[in-house]
Amino acid sequence: MAAAPDTGKRCVIWFGNPGAREKVMLAADGWQVRAVLPQQPAEIGMRDGDVVVGLIDFRTSSDSELERIGRLTAEHRHMPLFALTPADDGHVLHPLLSSCQRQFPHPPDLKDLLRQLQLVGQDSPAPVVDDVMATLLGESDVMLAMRATLRKLAPVDLPVLITGETGTGKEVAAHALHRLSPRGSRPFQAVNCGAIPSTLLQSELFGHERGAFTGATSRRQGLFETAHTGTVFLDEIGDLPLDAQTSLLRVLQEGTIERVGSNQPITVDVRILAATHVDLERAVEEGRFRRDLYYRLNVLRLSMPPLRHRQGDIDLLSRHFLNSFRTRHRIRARGYTTQARQAMERFDWPGNVRELLNRVQRAAITADGELITSADLELAGDGTPDAARLGNARSHAERETLLSCLQQSRFNVSACARLMKVSRVTVYRLCRKHQLTLETLR
């Protein structure tokens, strides 16, 4: 394999067996490999401009050695970590594994390992590998593309409209956009526009003067004032009332706000991020959302992919959530059965990453054994939620009972109703529900 240029800028910090063939292969490919023995971890020598990735060999490191490695890598939390794991990486239980952006089971695909290392310099995932950014983890093509877009948008001081289904991580993406922007050390204020009564929303956003309304006993700053020089995140912007939309438009156009009960403009310097799970273009056409505001907000756009489109990420996320949960709570669960992992892969996840997180945490608490089952996750073996499975069984039984009674009554609705002890209207309704046509059955 040909050595890549600029080798001094391409560095791997190697944690593990210094004689491993992968370490030798990386050096032959032009990477500068700095070995850090897990028995005696030393300070990582990192120079400005280095493209550095930590490669942890879980195959040869003991739990105590991994603890030392974890403490050392925690001091360099922006360094992306890769993992070399045993063939059955389900037996790797150490929480440090959840911090690794990419895992390579033994024997690793060396070409893939080199390709992923090469991408670090071009598309470093480091900013998204921490607890706050957990829901942005993923190796699927759609997540790699989303993170690349996010990094392009973050430094540009313009509004961003974040779209996606509920539970896809829109607020997490907003935090990332803020943290990676020049305003990252400044205030970040978030508000759910659909969770605040419309009568209080103007006050919440723009503040109020004393005596502006009943109960306003003192002057109060709104989110835009407290976020001055920082970022305001408006979640569920599609639920913003029209009067508040007019005030928000003024902020975007003029950079000023007015407190409720005052006509004195106040200059604010904020970047506005907005998110929605509804179709704003349709809302504009239906007159529920101002067209001019839509174009002001939709300067830059970030789309969050649903979990069902993130091929391969469900396993990565479920492991991460469980390992992270285990470090904070004393629970027995340490992994998943094969059936549980298959059920998660087959499930459609209408609640997306948020639903996966909730199911994993609930299952981790209620599981009786060390491995979480599909029943613990409230998923059937085929990936169907247990509640839906029960509903399907009931529906099937209902249809069979109806069909049996119709046959016994020779498809006489009145006689069938008497057999079932229901009204004739109910029989007709059940026939429609189960798509049974009396004429055809007769």
Image: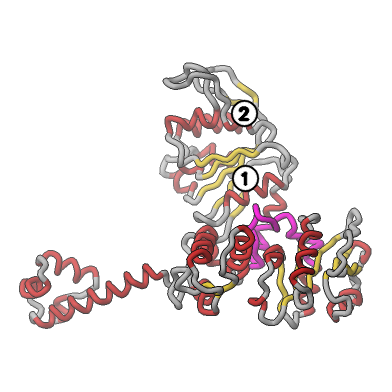
Q: Amino acid at mark 1?
A: Val
Whether 405 is drawn above or below 208: the answer is below
| Residue at 69% over, 68% down | 94
Q: Nearer the viewer, residue 85 or 95?
A: 95
The reply, left or right, for residue 206 in relation to residue 73 is left
Counting from the top left corner in percent of width and height, residue 168 is at 55, 57
Whether 156 is drawn above or below 148: the answer is above
The reply, left or right, for residue 71 in relation to residue 169 is right
Mark 1 sits on what residue?
160
| Residue at 85% over, 66% down | 13
Circle 2: element type: helix
Counting from the top left corner in percent of width and height, residue 72 is at 81, 59
Mark 2 sits on what residue?
225
User: Was residue 124 drawn as part of the magenta stretch in this picture?
Assistant: yes
User: Was residue 158 drawn as part of the magenta stretch in this picture?
Assistant: no
How many neighbours does mark 2 have within 10 angstroms: few (below 14), some (14-19), or many (20 or more)? Answer: many
Circle 1: element type: strand
| Residue at 43% over, 33% down | 198
Q: Amino acid at mark 2?
A: Glu
Q: Quadrant of residue 140?
A: bottom right
- Who comes first in sequence, dot 2 or dot 1? 1
Counting from the top left corner in percent of width and height, residue 435 is at 24, 73
Magenta segment main secondary structure: helix
Give the magenta part as a residue range.
118-147
